[in-house]
Image (spheres, grey):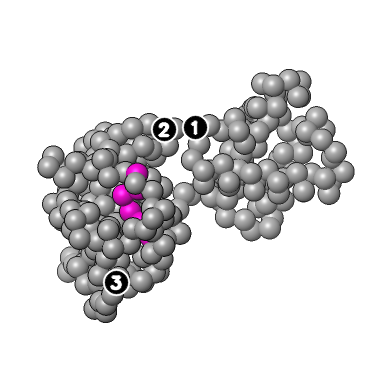
Amino acid sequence: MRSLSAASPNTVAAYRSDLERFAEWAGGAGIDGPDGVDRAVLRRYLAFLAANQKARRTIRRRTAALRRYFAWLSRTGVIAANPAAALHASGGEQRLPRVLRDVEVEALLDAPPTRVDGDDIAVRLRDDAVLELLYGSGLRVGELCGLRPEDVDLRRARVTVWGKGNKQRQVPMSEPSVDAVRAWQTSGRAALAGDDTPVDALFLNRRGRRLTPRDVRRILDRRAPAPTHPHALRHTFATHLLDGGADLRAVQELLGHADLATTQLYTHVSKERLRSVYDETHPRA
């Protein structure tokens, strides 16, 4: 786990869980150590996952965890050969990401709950800023939670984020997100801050601590008209850019994707959306 220095904490936690589950399965199969694992064992494990109807996305992630683990074992001399060097999960159609409909975006950003009292005013300002940044700049939820006050340049309307692999990028801010962040900083943050509030945290929870991904999910639970994951706002950001004619390379840079193939997934989403619009509106569709 310590060798995964470029991975996010969420990825490290997921890999740990994945490897623990594999070790448990392998132990049950009579294998008492990594030197007893060969390619056939790994293929049997993936077949076991598929037989138990694990999602393709879960199987792909567990495959990636195994590749990283056995590569590390080989590199450090624990095993002589890497049985996972060419291991790949079975193919299959990749599920397209969920993109919010326009009416859902409007309900989320422009029609928040009406109840406002006490520190709910500060919470409302924070929630507005969080949601506007997630949708307006396409940030990952971990990137948003890690923001510092100095990372947002309201005058130039841009935000500096540290993405996967500790890579820095600058992303433009929409006008509504600039206004929302300014309102939070000037009128909301102090109301939630306490004696032990970290000065380097832009967004705070009700306890005055740095906002966490779980806190962000709770914000979506309160504000979204239908169950919505924070990453859906990032998907929507990318898809709306492509729908508007943005260059794929530009979208890749804004999202912080290392591989263009990851960004290309959104071109399929856009085509699906166009087909849906055609089917719903053309008289001979």
Mark 3 burial class by Cα count in 10 Å: few <14, some 14-19, many 20+: some
Counting from the top left corner in percent of width and height, residue 38 is at 77, 32
Q: Residue at x 65, y 52 (%)?
A: 50
Q: Is residue 272 visible?
A: no
Q: Secondary structure at mark 1?
A: loop
Q: Nearer the viewer, mark 1 or mark 3?
A: 3
Which amino acid, mark 1?
Answer: Ala
- Amino acid of disc 2: Asn
Q: Which residue is mark 3?
A: 120
Above/below status of 63 relative to 222: above
Between 117 and 229, the one nearer to me in the picture? 117
Q: Quadrant of the C terminus?
A: bottom left
Determine which of the numbered discs, if any, sits on residue 6 in the image.
Answer: 1
Give the residue displayed 27% in from the left and 58% down from the top.
190
Q: Residues within 10 Å of mark 2 (few under 14, many from 20)?
A: few
Label whose residue precedes the other's in the sequence (1 or 3): 1
- Which is nearer the N-term, disc 1 or disc 2? 1
Residue in front for this viewpoint, 234 or 247: 234
Compute the Cα span from label 1 to label 3: 37 Å
The stretch of residues the image draws in magenta is: 200-205
Instruction: Specify the farthest residue to the right.
Output: 30
Image quadrant in which you'd find residue 12: top right
Residue type at mark 3: give it: Asp
**Spatial CA span between label 1 and label 2:** 6 Å
- Mark 1 crowd level (few <14, some 14–19, many ≥20, 10 Å Cα): some
Q: Dots 1 and 2: beta carbons under 8 Å?
A: yes
Q: Which of labels 2 and 3 is toward the front?
A: 3
Which quadrant, please, contains the N terminus? top right
The residue pinned by badge 2 equals: 166
Provide the secondary structure element on which disc 2 rests.
helix
Please name the predominant secondary structure of the magenta segment in the image.
loop
